[in-house]
Amino acid sequence: MDSIEGVDQANGPAPHTLTIRYDAEADRVLIVDQTRLPHDYVEVELKTLADACYAISAMQVRGAPLIGVTAAFGVYLSLRGKEDITARNSVSQTVEALAATRPTAINLRWALTEVEASLARCDSDLAAAALNAALELHAQDIEACALLGEHGAQRLQELWEAKCERAAQAGLSKPERLNILTHCNAGSLATVDWGTALAVIYKAQARGIPLHVWVDETRPRNQGASLTCWELGQRGVAHTLIVDNAGGHLMQQGYVDCCVVGSDRTTLRGDVCNKIGTYLKALAAADNGIPFYVALPVSSIDFTLRDGLVEIPIEEREAEEVSHISGLDDQGIIRRVRLAPTGTVVSNYGFDVTPARLVSGLITERGIIAAHEAALTKLRDSLS
């Protein structure tokens, strides 16, 4: 993989670039290397299937929708330059290699299934068909996230107006802002563009709603601290970084009006699988009467599963994500240091499941859907 561009964030904001894009003139697939953020903004070229698999497994790209689109381009890269017979014989092996990179996010398998279906309908030039399928998924993701962002922004506007009305009825001055808590990174970096949970924020900001976002650091990889804070800073959204365990306290003190998170896989019953720690935030929100919304494209719903606690495979990741940490030192050098004593046994589950009963609603491109089986069955049937 080749590094295409680096931007020193100290010298100004990064240009707005899609997290994955296809350069048709040069026939190149380019990604933003998220392992380098927030300190370096670097685009990397994916040249081969191995590059695509590494980008997903090493989390150069992450977030369920983005993983799926990257996998689709990975199929194209594996077929590029091959004769049709050779290409067709390699499709199954290619799909399995990509599917094995991350087990939890449903968009990965969904996108691969979509590409396979396109190839099955194709008589010749499989590489071109794979590229067209990837580009279609790329465009669909942008559209879906923009739409769900609008639906979510409407709900935030309703919450803001209700907050102002309560203040007026109590004889208080107009509130300064609507406070939203989010977990992990569900922004444009987790999709092709716009994001899921943060798409709601960006669309609400465009409506002029005064917003402030509480950003969980999201251990162990700190995607909240490194990615969400970076994104919100780029967009000029007021935000405050907090440790993961502070959310419940803030809710008890009345400093949170709403929680909005993303999802890597949601079941037919409405159970939501997301970054580890999401379940605890949902419990705290329920205990304090705070709305807890999940923003996701319909492609993140696994209609074949019902019970998320039993049926969703939970990824366990490397121990060093917990025992070590990387950051920028006072000399401007990125260093990796050990946190735990040598030999410490580490458990590193990447996701947890929030039961549907704790979810106020699923914000999708089809509108806000109730997190229960009847509503999701109706949605599933409308798609067929």
Image: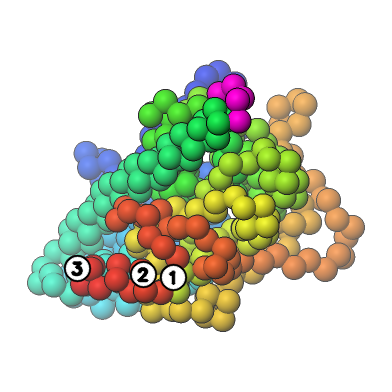
Query: Which residue is located at x 22 percent, y 59 percent?
Result: 133
The residue segment tinted magenta is 170-174
Q: Are marks 2 and 1 in contact (CB under 8 Å)?
A: yes
Q: Nearer the viewer, mark 3 or mark 2?
A: 2
Residue that numbered label 3 is attached to: 118
| Cα–Cα gap, marks 3 and 1 | 32 Å
Residue furthest to the bottom in view is: 310
What percent of the width, then of the height, locates residue 26?
Answer: 25, 40
Q: Which residue is mark 2?
A: 376
Q: Secondary structure at mark 1?
A: loop
Looking at the rendered structure, the kind of residue marked 2 is Leu
Using the image, tell me which numbered label, if any, was put on residue 124. Answer: none
Residue at the (22%, 54%) spot, across then down: 136
For the rendered model, the colour scheme is rainbow
Residue at x-position 60% and y-position 50%:
290
* Amino acid residing under circle 3: Ser
Q: Nearer the viewer, residue 36 or 66?
A: 66
Residue on which disc 1 sits = 372
Relative horizontal placement of residue 56, taking residue 335 as reference (left or right):
left
Pick whichever, 21 or 76, lies toward us. Answer: 21
Position of residue 254 measured from the top left corner of the image (x, y, whole percent): 68, 40
Q: Indicate left or right for 378 with 281 as reference.
A: left
Identify the mark nearer the N-term, 3 or 2.
3
The image shows residue 123 at horizontal and vertical percentages of 10, 72
Tell me the CA gap for discs 2 and 1: 6 Å
